Image (cartoon, grey):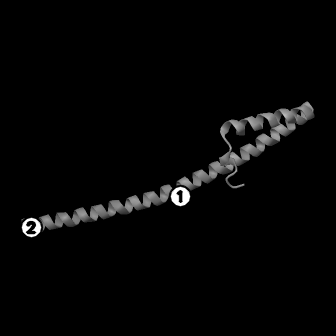
Amino acid sequence: MEHFLEQIDPYTFTGSAFLLGLLLANDLTEDEQDSVGNWLQLVGMTMQTYASQVTTTSSNNSQKSSSTSTMESIEKTILRMQQEMENIKKQKY
């Protein structure tokens, strides 16, 4: 089931949800429809919140490692520039 959702085109995916909603609505009272609808929305929001937090923490971790490597690169560049300046000074004097 890992790649199951990737194999469904958007129209079929959306259409199946629409049809399932209509089928469920026929067999439920208005209060039951409202309750089940709220429950399904809660499931969806929980999944979205979880996925969003995974993305946020992954992004933050990669930004931190990227910032660290950027700082190391800048420090190395500054060191090389300082060495080059020292070499230029030695050549002039």
How much space separates mark 1 and mark 2, taking CA atoms?
Answer: 45 Å
Amino acid on which the number 1 mark rests in the picture:
Asn
- Mark 2 Cα-neighbour bin, 10 Å: few <14, some 14–19, many ≥20: few
The residue carrying mark 2 is: 91
Q: Hey, which quadrant is residue 69 in on the image?
A: bottom left
Q: Hey, which quadrant is residue 80 in on the image?
A: bottom left
Question: On screen, 19 above or below 75?
Answer: above
Position of 83 with respect to 28 (left or right) is left
Residue 39 placement (x, y as % from top left): 82, 42
Residue 82 placement (x, y as % from top left): 23, 64
Q: Residue at x 37, y 63 (%)?
A: 72
Question: On screen, 82 above or below 24?
Answer: below
The residue carrying mark 1 is: 61
- Identify the image quadrant of the C terminus: bottom left
Q: Residue at x 11, y 68 (%)?
A: 90
Position of 43 with respect to 68 (left or right) is right
Amino acid on which the number 2 mark rests in the picture:
Gln
Q: Secondary structure at mark 1?
A: helix
